[in-house]
């Protein structure tokens, strides 16, 4: 599955896109708006996404990669 397909499936399931998750992560204090803050671990973000949005591990990791900046909406 391509990264774009992950994002499309996440949007279909949650109604939220990449910008929504960036905003929500900043509100939770996980990011400074552009990058993940020092000391915030992947597991913390993944658990939040699983608990609050019902995402599976792979989809939660896709959002983590997006927040980390290692992937973008344009990634394959």
Image: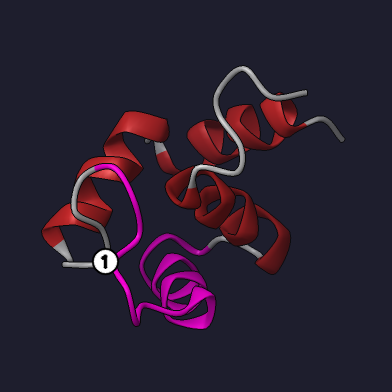
* Count of numbered badges drawn on the protein: 1
In the drawing, does residue 26 fall left or right of residue 70? Answer: left
Name the residue that disc number 1 marks.
30
Furthest-right residue in view? 1
User: Which of 57 and 69 lies nearest the eye of the viewer?
Assistant: 69
Q: Position of residue 38 (x, y in %)?
A: 32, 74
Let me know if residue 45 is in the magenta part.
Answer: yes
Q: Residues within 10 Å of mark 1 (few under 14, many from 20)?
A: many
Name the image quarter holding the N terminus: top right
Name the image quarter holding the C terminus: top right
Decide: is 23 above or below 52: above
Let me know if residue 17 is in the magenta part.
Answer: no
Quadrant in the rendering for residue 29: bottom left
Report the residue at 37% width, 35% height from top.
16
User: Which of 67 and 24 lies nearest the eye of the viewer?
Assistant: 67
Quadrant in the rendering for residue 53: bottom left
Report the residue at 69% width, 24% height from top.
75
Decide: is 68 above or below 49: above
Report the residue at 59% width, 33% height from top.
7
In the drawing, does residue 51 fall left or right of residue 20? Answer: right
Q: Position of residue 52 (x, y in %)?
A: 36, 67
Q: Position of residue 14 (x, y in %)?
A: 43, 43
Q: Secondary structure at mark 1?
A: loop
Decide: is 31 above or below 4: below
Report the residue at 55% width, 23% height from top.
73
Furthest-front residue in view? 38
Furthest-left residue in view? 27
Decide: is 60 above or below 45: above
In the drawing, does residue 35 fall left or right of residue 61? Answer: left
Instruction: Give the extent of the magenta segment.
Output: 34-54
């Amino acid at each position: 599955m391509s990264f774009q397909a992950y994002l499309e499936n996440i949007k279909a399931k949650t109604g939220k896109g990449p910008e929504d998750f960036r905003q929500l992560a900043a509100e939770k204090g996980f990011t400074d708006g552009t990058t993940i803050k020092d000391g915030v671990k992947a597991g913390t973000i993944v658990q939040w996404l699983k608990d609050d949005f019902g995402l599976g591990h792979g989809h939660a990791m896709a959002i983590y990669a997006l927040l980390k900046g290692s992937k973008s909406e344009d990634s394959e």
